[in-house]
Image: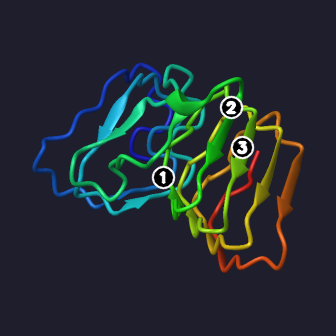
């Protein structure tokens, strides 16, 4: 509850050599922040971090180089959405945390192949998805992976689901 409902808080910054390890649940709920860069030292992002942060846009959560969530060349995000859709190609093993955060332009996703193992924290939080089929290869659904999606009406787990962990608020509205 570090900054819970601090409605006048517009900016948060961390030193590049930060020792911060965990950002606990509801830390930034109902604040006015418009972007944030998470330090590379952080190893845990808990659920409900940005609920009610209406000023925080799609791709407003960034990660410092060296972070486990720092995007690689093969990671997709809201900028890859075309005509409301995106296809995750074969060979991709994760959908990176915050990839499609508040990406209301995303209404449809195709996860090609059967290589995705983890859908990370907040990956589709607040997106415009109307339905999703989670491949049988997925073993982990991260914190708030499909949280706060008003338009989501159907979730299907394909084939014999390999799901082993579904973290808090993975499918919460």
Circle 1 residue: 96
Which mark sits nearer the N-terminus, 1 or 3?
Answer: 1
Identify the secondary structure beneath mark 2: loop
Q: In terms of secondary structure, where does tag 3 sit?
A: strand
Residue at image point 76% right, 38% down: 108
| Front residue of 12 and 143 | 143
Q: Label 1, label 2: how many angstroms apart (C-alpha)?
A: 15 Å
Residue pictured at 80% horizontal, 34% vertical: 150
From the image, state whether disc 1 or disc 3 is nearer to you.
3
**Where is mark 3, residue-wise?**
109
In the displayed structure image, the side of residue 43 where residue 32 appears, left or right: right
Contact, mark 1 vs mark 3 (Cβ under 8 Å): no
Q: Nearer the viewer, residue 18 or 108?
A: 108
Using the image, determine if residue 90 lies above or below residue 81. below
Residue ID at (71%, 43%): 109
Counting from the top left corner in percent of width and height, residue 90 is at 59, 59
| Quadrant of image for the C terminus | top right
Return the x and y of residue 114 as percentages of the image width and height: 66, 68
Q: In this view, does 89 lie to the left or right of 162?
A: left
Decide: few, some or many residues near mark 2? Use Cα within 10 Å; few <14, some 14-19, many ≥20.
many
The residue pinned by badge 2 equals 106
Mark 3 surroundings within 10 Å by alpha-carbon count, few (fewer than 14), some (14 through 19), many (20 or more)? some
Q: Position of residue 35 (x, y in %)?
A: 38, 27
């Amino acid at each position: 509850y570090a900054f819970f409902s601090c409605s006048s808080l517009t900016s948060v910054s961390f030193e590049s050599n930060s020792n911060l390890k965990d950002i606990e649940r509801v830390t930034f709920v109902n604040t006015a922040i418009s972007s944030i860069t998470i330090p590379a030292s952080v190893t845990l992002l808990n659920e409900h971090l940005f609920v009610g942060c209406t000023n925080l846009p799609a791709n407003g959560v960034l990660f410092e180089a060296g972070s486990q969530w720092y995007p690689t060349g093969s990671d997709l995000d809201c900028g890859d959405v075309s005509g409301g859709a995106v296809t995750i190609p074969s060979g991709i093993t994760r959908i990176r945390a915050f990839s499609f955060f508040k990406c209301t332009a995303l209404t449809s996703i195709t996860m090609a192949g059967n290589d995705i193992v983890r859908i990370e924290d907040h990956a589709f939080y607040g997106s415009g998805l109307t339905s999703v089929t989670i491949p049988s290869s997925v073993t982990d659904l991260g914190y708030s992976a499909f949280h706060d999606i008003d338009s989501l009406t159907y979730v299907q787990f394909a084939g014999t689901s390999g799901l082993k962990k579904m973290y808090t608020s993975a499918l919460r509205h």
